[in-house]
Amino acid sequence: RTSTPAEKSNNPHRPTPTPTLPGACDASAPPAATGGAVMVGFFRSGNLASRVFDRQFLSPRPGATVNTVRQFYENLVPSYTIYDIDCPDYSFRKFTDDGKYLVAFSRNHQDLIVYRPIWLTFSCHEECDSHDLPANAERFDSFFKQLYSISLASSNEYICKDFFLYMECHQYGLFATSTAQSNDSSATDGAIHGVPSIEKITFYLVRLEDGAILDEKAFCNDFINLAHSIGAYLYEDLVCIVSLRYQTIHVLQIRDSGSLVEVRRIGAFCREDDELFLYSHGQAAQGNSFLPGIKQRLLSYIFRKTWNEEPDQALRVQHLKKKFYFHFQDYVDLIIWKVQFLDRRHLFIKFGSVDGGVTRSTDQNLAFFAVYNMETTDIVSLYQNSSEELYSLFEHYYDHFHANPQNSSHEKFISSHSNSVHALDQLCTIKNKASSSSQFVKKMMASLPYTCQSQSPSPYFDLSIFRYDEKLISAIDRHRHCTEHPIKFISVRQPNVVKFKIKPGSDSGGSDSRAKRISSFLFHPFFPLALSIQQTYMQPTVVNVHFRR
């Protein structure tokens, strides 16, 4: 496929061709290669020293500087592994997107531990490359310096190890603790039947620089999906938290002073004075007979859309009976599953059944996606999870679903099918292999709304630079089934060249193959540094450090 000039200029992942000065050549290239600029560029692409030399006098195209710099990672790869490194028995969560901190939790889920990445240094009397690392260098504290350890959870609360959001501009971290979940709780006033209850959920705002707890926000007898930060979304200084039990979207603002202030609450009421209006008209006591405000907005939009679909006045009533009133109770039973910000005014809300909101498998459940304007309290558009129109938006404008003006420069270059031809090719391959188009669309829509900060910005996941088996490893923050063989990262420019390998678990590979093993990978956003963590049932955790020596 040949890209148009417009596509080339708008694609941030497209490699920038390196111009060659007349007579310039690579010292490592054979004489035959020095006669042609194409061959010179080919040999320089695999030579780090030549790339640094080119950078001194060749400027990239406007807007392509970061993309050009990321091409250096073809030569800056993790080349050495320390297996089963001597490290504290902690649950390591992730690197922050600016690379300044590594967040971990204690095994009893009571304490927060924060490290600062440092680079391994050691000296030797002879040529260092011919020596193994000294014994004192093969320690966790040779790579990471512990800044502090603070207690977040009380005796009956536990830190949710999957929940963590980072506000880079102030270096604030948002953490969550909760008590045990109760599935047999009675439905209180306003609560949704069938949704479990948690006695107390507390969100803590922590300044990662020194570990100071700046503010906290508690929710009692509620249910918020904390797994993988699904129940909250951070956009600039705004955080939306979804109460599944009471069907309320809490919009909080993180002030510069470090305080959490609730600026909007969307659910039973959409406007700030809705409740006052009902009280003033003596209808507050009958509030239970009213549908929640957000549900009324949804039903009104569906009604108007169905009304406008049939222009014939004589047939409009029959059309409403068939398309709206026949499914009226199904629409009333919809609940909010998940929410994200599209910008400071618009929310992207997913509605579905009660069962789908609590369980994790939602591919086959009927769901609707609504764009909600918080200022006008109107639903702007509505799509079903089998909508081809929504899939087209998902395919071509996926980056708009997770755009955040305060994202780090590294996070803005996460590969997706809307900015990378390589990712688009993969998506088209999956689409062509799908047996049913509608089922494929539903499967793709299951990832919406986007889960905040769920992908690693590491350049080693850039699909314009490396290829890898996404069944074994990917930029998405999820546990994977462990494999016996190393995971290969192959050069895109040179398809037969394996740039480096990542192998979780022990070096010998002699573990029991019958035991269930899962692995997770933590990549630094810009250093050639990664942690692979293998967990096996009833066995100690194995942590490997992969770095460039």
Image (spheres, rainbow, N blue to C red):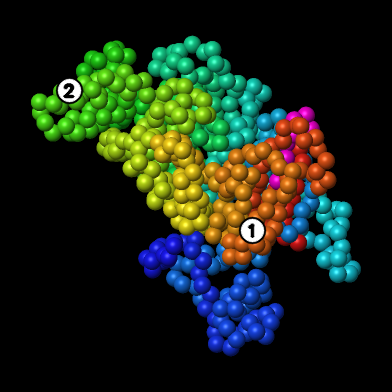
The image shows residue 9, relative to residue 453, as above or below, that is: below
Q: State the image coordinates of residue 86 (x, y, percent, origin top left).
A: 81, 45
Q: State the image coordinates of residue 143 (x, y, percent, origin top left).
A: 74, 53
Reading the image, the residue beneath label 2 is: 318
**Element class at badge 2:** helix
Image quarter hosting the N terminus? bottom left
Badge 2: residue crowd in 10 Å (few <14, some 14–19, many ≥20):
few
**Element class at badge 1:** strand
Cα separation, mark 1 vs mark 2, equals: 60 Å
The amino acid beneath tag 1 is: Ile
Q: In terms of depth relative to the viewer, which is nearer, 157 or 242?
A: 242
Magenta stretch, residue numbers? 532-540
Q: How many marks?
A: 2
Badge 1: residue crowd in 10 Å (few <14, some 14–19, many ≥20):
many
Reading the image, the residue beneath label 1 is: 490
Label located before the other in sequence (1 or 2): 2
Q: Name the residue located 27 percent from the left edge and 26 percent from the top edge.
A: 299
Q: In terms of depth relative to the viewer, which is nearer, 321 or 409?
A: 321
Q: Residue furthest bottom?
A: 23
The answer to whether residue 133 is left or right of residue 214 is right
